[in-house]
Amino acid sequence: MGYKAWQLGDPGGLLYGCYDFLRRRLNHKLVNYLLTTCAHKDPCIVLEAGSGPAFATSILSCDQRIGLAVAIDIDIEALKEAKKRDECLNIVVADIEKLPFRNDCIGLVWNSSTLEHLPTLDHALAEMTRVASSGGNVFVGVPNLYGPLGFQKCLPKSSIGVWIGTTFDRQELQELMRRANLEPQDSIFYFFRFFVGVLACKTSQSAGGSGPQTQKC
């Protein structure tokens, strides 16, 4: 099996099992945050754009506040693992930089530990913004430059550096969201500060509207 950003060790091995256990804990806490801050419009449609094996989407789909939860990833192998774990999961094989959804149709578009593996974030964020509904939310979580993974800057081309991906500080991530015409609303450090996340709102201006007021998220 080749290198996968969502994988550590071989499936069935001790290293993989430990990582899988930690990832499940991370996803439960992150889902609780997203539900608390974003799921105010019932039923909420949620897209995990760049999901890997989509643990969080499985959790979201079981919550009564979520009308539809969909996971997309370009990695067919990861989605096969997801479907093997959860037969009811809604999955789509797609490129995050070319999402197969119409404009302004999804209440929450999000990912965690995904964009740091892309050469640039701008195209992916632009697509996430495009499909988010006006007044809806976009959340991005990436490795924290000032957390335990900050050493990645010293060895970006090593195998562990590539596996971690680029690290970011909160201000840098907020600025990237603004460049995508999103308005940052909240930020969190999670999983023992390994990751930093920014929650942003798609305003009427982001959606191409002409009104002077920012819509409340």
Image (cartoon, rainbow, N blue to C red):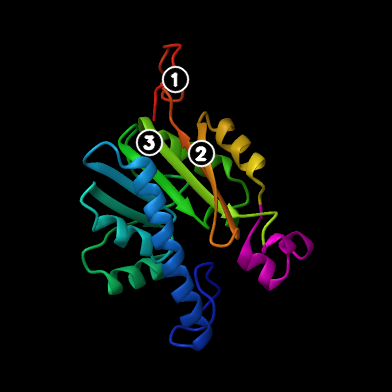
| Contact between labelled residues 2 and 1, with CB atoms less than 8 Å apart | no
Q: What secondary structure is marked by label 2?
A: strand
Q: Which residue is mark 1?
A: 214
Amino acid type of the residue tagged 2 in the rendering:
Asp
Residue 182 in picture, x, y percent from top left? 50, 31
Does residue 162 sit above or below 139 in this rendering?
below
Q: CA distance from mark 1 to mark 2?
A: 15 Å
Tell me which residue sits at (41%, 24%) in the image.
207
Earlier in the chain: of badge 1 and badge 2, it is 2
Q: CA distance from mark 3 to mark 1?
A: 15 Å
Amino acid type of the residue tagged 3 in the rendering:
Ala
Q: Nearer the viewer, residue 42 or 102?
A: 42
| Contact between labelled residues 3 and 2, with CB atoms less than 8 Å apart | no
Q: CA distance from mark 2 to mark 3?
A: 17 Å
Q: What secondary structure is marked by label 1?
A: loop
Earlier in the chain: of badge 2 and badge 3, it is 3
Q: Nearer the viewer, mark 1 or mark 2?
A: 2
Tag shown at residue 186: 2
- Neighbourhood count class around disc 3 (C-alpha, 10 Å): few under 14, some 14–19, many 20 upward: many
Earlier in the chain: of badge 3 and badge 1, it is 3
Residue 192 in picture, x, y percent from top left? 58, 62
Range of residues picked out in magenta? 148-167
Q: Nearer the viewer, residue 143 or 82?
A: 143
Tag shown at residue 132: 3
Q: Is residue 159 magenta?
A: yes
Tag shown at residue 15: none
Q: Is residue 191 magenta?
A: no
Residue 216 in picture, x, y percent from top left? 39, 25
Tell me which residue sits at (43%, 47%) in the image.
110
